[in-house]
Amino acid sequence: MKATTVIVLCAAFAACRSSPELPAARFANAPPVTAVNDRRDVAKPPATRVFYPAIYNFDGVLGRRLPRALELPRRQRALGVNSIDEVPDSTWFTNRNGARPLSLDEVRTGPLTTDSPELHRPWTVRSTKAGGASIGFMITDARGIKYLLKFDDAGSPEIETAFDVIVDRLLWAAGFNVPEDQIVYFRDDDLVVAPDAVVKDADGSASGRLDREGLERRLAQVDHGKDGRIRGLVSRWIAGKTLGGHPGEGVRDDDPNDRIPHELRRDLRGAYSIFAWLDHVDVQEGNFVDSWIADPADPHRHYVRHYFIDFGRSLSAMALFQFDWRRGHTYLVDFADIARTFVTLGLIDRDWQHRPLDPKPYVGVFDAGTFDPGSWHPDWPAYLPFVTADRYDKFWGAKIVGHFTREQIAAAVDAGQIHDRAARDFIVDTLLARRRQTLAYWFARVNPLDRFSAVTTDAGTRLCFDDLAIVDQLAGAGPTRYQIRAYTMRGESFGAVADVPADATGHTCTIVPLALPFDHDGYTILRVVTSRSAYAGETDVHVALARDTGLPRVIGLWRP
């Protein structure tokens, strides 16, 4: 693991006199960090957090919201990013599809590491699942592997099980830790009741014994196919000691590796754009899990790994199951929406009113026509990383959405085993449409230049970069130009201003001057200004000569 790259401020340099038009940020002359060491040994498991939904949501609406507003918190850019404004690998996030294109088999398989429990029957029922009114069981297969077994809602075949697996695969490919979820088919007699099986209440406490009669009574409420088989979703129990969800604000005080306040983590804040794309509105502490695990390479070392869980109400399934078309468009308690309704006497036209009135079989009400990437809402305003997220965080999340191809999205949808081909194609098309809307919205709010590199040629140093708006065919190359101005580390302008047309492919290269006559390894700041119809944006690219090779390289990005 590499140590975190330090952003060196101008004040650290006695001679530094930055131009007023340049931000003060400067970067160490070192390669960008690709991984952080947050796997140092935590000998004792941190305390388990107990989740109380009513208190959590009340705090989000009023209890913590008002005091936080009175604190006048300063807007702060995300932490947990490297010098090129990306998120390094950690126990929270792993660069997957963004680091290299995943194969279709990798996307379909996602986090799975073992054979399906379908191949290892019978399954022993240990208890009913804790919490909620829906039917579910804790089981172990013939290998002794523990799973949570859940089912589709009556009258909505395949929706919850399929949507969970689809979103599980997409979030895994995006880079997040998720459980091993998969579709299974079985018969009633594939389940064996353990002698000590119990019924659990909402708090997870045993409230009685579960016998065969109780099992069959519950299975009778679950849809059986024409062949007598039941379709279910199994979620492999997360390894290690589970600790409850991470707090949305602050850190776990008893985890020495947890050093960045969660409301400032880029990987959590930037998940907003990805959750909006997938309409995953059930964002609450109960749908995150931290687990104290042994390191696979060294079982004597332990640390905490962080997971997202429970995606069956994504892709607008929450709106369908709760008969509430507002989901994803407003908070459940939304004072701004209440005020608008009061002032306009309810006559104002709201986008959620245009959602499909008749749910589609195997699809529900998932749509792209009413989706607005900038005004999407989870169910409650309680998850602080989404409240503090800024356009740079959401741009980062949108870039991850942009990495998915049609074929990869289709592979994730295939993992959901939707038997209706038209429904499967509709979900793929809708995800693609929402992908385009997500990119169009956030690429218009942050200069969408990325993948910068400095290349040495006989003619000089070439700065190369991708314009993601052109790469994703959201803008044309014809009306797009880039102006590039060079500055020394002290912020002094030098050299001529380059005016470069965009390449039709979206990948543009141009010769740029470097501050070679100056000190600090030729440290040069290249401000790249993008101009096209109705849009202008800029990015500062920091370049220096590598001390081992003497060749120029990009050492940092700053998005003003």
Image (cartoon, rainbow, N blue to C red):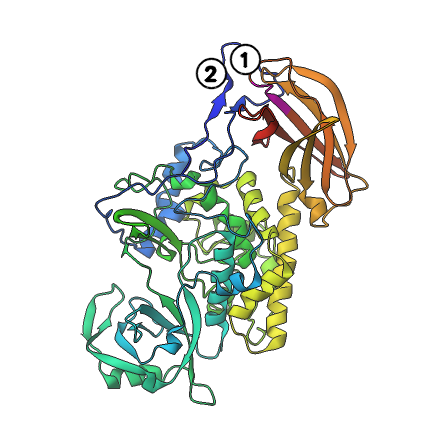
Q: Residues within 10 Å of mark 2 (few under 14, many from 20)?
A: few
**How far from the left and from the top, in percent, is residue 500?**
77, 32
Asked whether the residues under the numbered discs 1 and 2 touch, taking CB atoms below 8 Å apart as contact, a structural biologist would say: yes
Q: Residue at x 28, y 67 (%)?
A: 130
Q: Vertical placement of 205 versus 287: above or below?
A: below
Quadrant in which the C terminus appears: top right
Q: Vertical placement of 394 versus 414: above or below?
A: above
The residue that disc 1 covers is 16
Q: Main secondary structure of the magenta part?
A: loop
**How far from the left and from the top, in percent, is residue 49?**
27, 51
Q: Residue at x 40, y 34 (%)?
A: 70
The kind of residue on which mark 1 rests is Cys
Q: Looking at the image, which is closer to me, 260 or 352?
A: 260
Q: Residue at x 50, y 67 (%)?
A: 163
The kind of residue on which mark 2 rests is Ala
- Residue at the far top in the pictured view: 15
232 lies left or right of 26? left
> Does residue 374 appear anywhere in the picture?
no
The residue that disc 2 covers is 12
410 lies left or right of 259? right
**How far from the left and from the top, in percent, is residue 497?**
75, 22
The quadrant holding residue 6 is top left
Q: Is residue 218 magenta?
A: no
Magenta stretch, residue numbers: 521-525
Q: Residues within 10 Å of mark 1 (few under 14, many from 20)?
A: some
216 lies left or right of 414? left
The quadrant holding residue 260 is top left
Q: Secondary structure at mark 1?
A: loop
**How far from the left and from the top, in percent, is residue 229?**
42, 85
Q: Secondary structure at mark 2?
A: helix
